[in-house]
Amino acid sequence: MGNQVLELNGHSLTLNDVVRVAREGCQVALDPAAVAFVERGAEAVASWVREDRVVYGITTGFGDLATVVIPAEKSQLLQRNLLLSHACGVGEPFPEDLVRAIMLLRVNTLTRGFSGISLPTLSQLVNYLNLGIHPVIPSQGSVGASGDLCPLSHLAISLLGEGEVFFQGRRMPTAEALQKTGLSPIDLKPKEGLALNNGTTVMTAIAALCVVDALSLGKMADVASALSLEALHGVPYAFDPRTHDLRPHTGQRTVAGNLRRLIEGSEIVAAYQGKRVQDAYSLRCVPQVHGASRDAVDYVRQKVEIEINSVTDNPLIFPADGEAISGGNFHGQPMAIAMDFFGIAAAEWANISERRTARLVDHKLSGLPPFLMKESGVNSGFMIPQYTAAAIVSENKVLAHPSSVDSIPTSANQEDHVSMGAYSARKGRQILENARKVLSIELLAAAQGLEFSRPLKAGKGTEAIHRALREEVPYLEADRYLHPLIQNVLGRVCDGTLLRKVEDAIGELD
């Protein structure tokens, strides 16, 4: 775990903070100024229970059972039962970095003091983060309203000593991890079950990490397209800034600028310039296509930055006014639509990448040896990697269908419109992972294709990516086992190594 400590106040969390905690092991603490707000909210709830006030989820049942009044002596049992009954998810558990992001966002929103959480319960969640206790949270079960009830309940029951966690590299019963760390299970107070399991935290955590990864992958898509452009002897005319000034979408102009920098000084581009006036759309329209995806991701980023510092459970506690308001901040529609949009954007990086790979392997279009092999026929070369890319982009086309338009009623029609935001986020994440694979295949093929232009040199940026790829994969004189080569490139795309080496050569891409 990292040594730095991030103080949380519920207002100023950034995407960089999410990465620091989720992936770099940064420790967290509660901002001392926020503790008073937490305690004030908890005391307001306790006073309402003492007064026998009827408040949704505190002295009533949940969902369609909101009309059932719960006596004060059963208010704590109500919260425990809520979590145990709602922890019914299925599917593969979320990975460690995502679980840490979920816990971080939950702490951050509860720190605002509008949820009625007590300081001991909130501190237990902080302890889990800092000690590396990661609850097993199944990935399926949320409809995105009322928030991510099911997966968050799996997080919450671990605070009670129930369920399972990952700790010290092992999956184990929560009780065992608590014994190892000297922690004790918490006793829930009124409202705390709802405070822990009601909200958009899971979909937002997925979205936050997706946005961070997409900001890097957008640059990598530009790099791959530039390498393919050089391998295919493309022309630079379509990247002229005068064209993009006449249609000044931010993403489009940014991508065109990146491409100009990547191919700057290319002997290959200079040698073939003037031999044709334009390229196919998958080369010529890279700024328009990649740029539109970048603009979409930027929209999602803005929504995520709002959501990670928002309070999204129900009811909301306003201690200064002595009121609890039952509203709908738990509804995941802002994240659901954003992540549907995200999935479409990431799918398009993959779609156009596969088309460039298809051109690289087709000698009738590329002017290169068939399937990028000098002795084709006896060698199949890069024929089937393009099949793999085609298979993946076809999967993405199905995944890109928006789940936010597919509401399904729950809780005896009390909750009659839901967002499906958790699935929007999950499939957006899958599409992003698929896009990385497709771009890795393009990089592998384009690096092979560039070899046939030697001894001419490519641009400063494209030479840098070619050198970086050759550190991972060789030029192929004959067929060999390709899966490990694709995995090598994919690993360096995912960990940022390839992008860093390009940016070391030409400066940071936009």
Image (cartoon, rainbow, N blue to C red):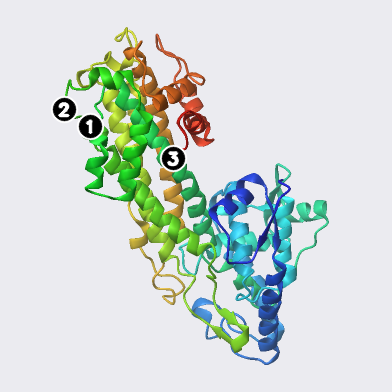
* x then y, percent, for residue 449: 34, 18
Q: Is residue 316 visible?
A: yes
Q: Which residue is mark 1?
A: 237
At a point 38% along the width and 66% down the height, the residue shown is: 408
Q: Is residue 18 above or below residue 10?
A: above
Q: Could you tell me which residue is drawn at 73 percent across and 60 percent down?
A: 161
For label 1, the SS is: helix
Cα separation, mark 2 vs mark 1, equals 8 Å
Label 2 or label 3, whichever lies nearer to me, is: 2
Q: Check disc 2 and report the residue beneath it.
A: 277
Q: Could you tell me the amino acid type at mark 2?
A: Val
Picture quarter with the N terminus: top right
Q: Look at discs 3 and 1 and give the one toward the viewer.
A: 1
Q: Are marks 3 and 1 in contact (CB under 8 Å)?
A: no
Image coordinates for residue 87, horizontal then vertical, percent: 59, 62
Check the image and report above or below for 474 versus 405.
above
What residue is pinned by disc 3?
A: 217
